[in-house]
Image (cartoon, helix red, strand yellow):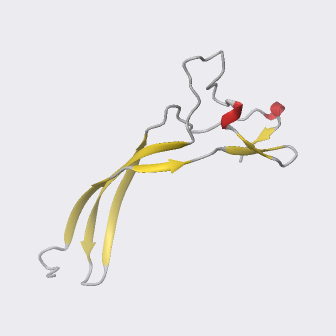
Amino acid sequence: MDITKTRFTTYLYGGIAVFHFNPWAYDNDGNKIHLQPLSTEGQGVAAFPSQKKYKLTQLALPFGAGIKYAVSDKVNMVLNSASEKHLLITWMMSVVLCRPCGLTRS
């Protein structure tokens, strides 16, 4: 490849991903407690009938763009920006845990 003509290369990418998660915390006795059955965000409780329990396996759409610079025939430098869109029914950015119920941050 003649890098004098193609030193910079731009690119886009995208895809589909499946991931599994199971959030948990430790109680005061050191026992691992899985959070989904506790309805920590109100899902699956009578007070919030429209909030269904989230599935532990979900889809995501990763995507990004970047620029590649050919320093030499064997060395490249890359500047990349990436993100992903999660297709969650209930988004779990963070769980605020209740200390009186015996849970602590994981």
List x then y, in percent, for residue 61.
Answer: 38, 46
Image quadrant in which you'd find residue 65: bottom left
Position of the N terminus, as image quadrant, is: bottom left
Question: Left of 99 or right of it: where is 91?
Answer: left
List x then y, in percent, for residue 105.
Answer: 72, 44
Q: Can residue 65 be seen in this view?
A: yes
Number of residue marks? 0
**What residue appears at the point 54 percent right and 18 percent down from the top-left corner?**
50
Image quadrant in which you'd find residue 53: top right
List x then y, in percent, for residue 31.
Answer: 82, 47
Q: In this view, does 4 lie above or below 101?
A: below
Q: In this view, does 51 lie above or below 55?
A: above
**What residue appears at the point 52 percent right and 35 percent down from the top-left corner?**
91
**What residue appears at the point 63 percent right and 29 percent down from the top-left corner?**
41
**What residue appears at the point 67 percent right and 29 percent down from the top-left corner?**
39
- Kindly give the residue lying farthest to the bottom in the view shown: 73
Question: Left of 77 or right of it: where is 86?
Answer: right
Q: Is residue 30 above or below residue 8?
A: above
- Kindly give the residue lying farthest to the left in the view shown: 5
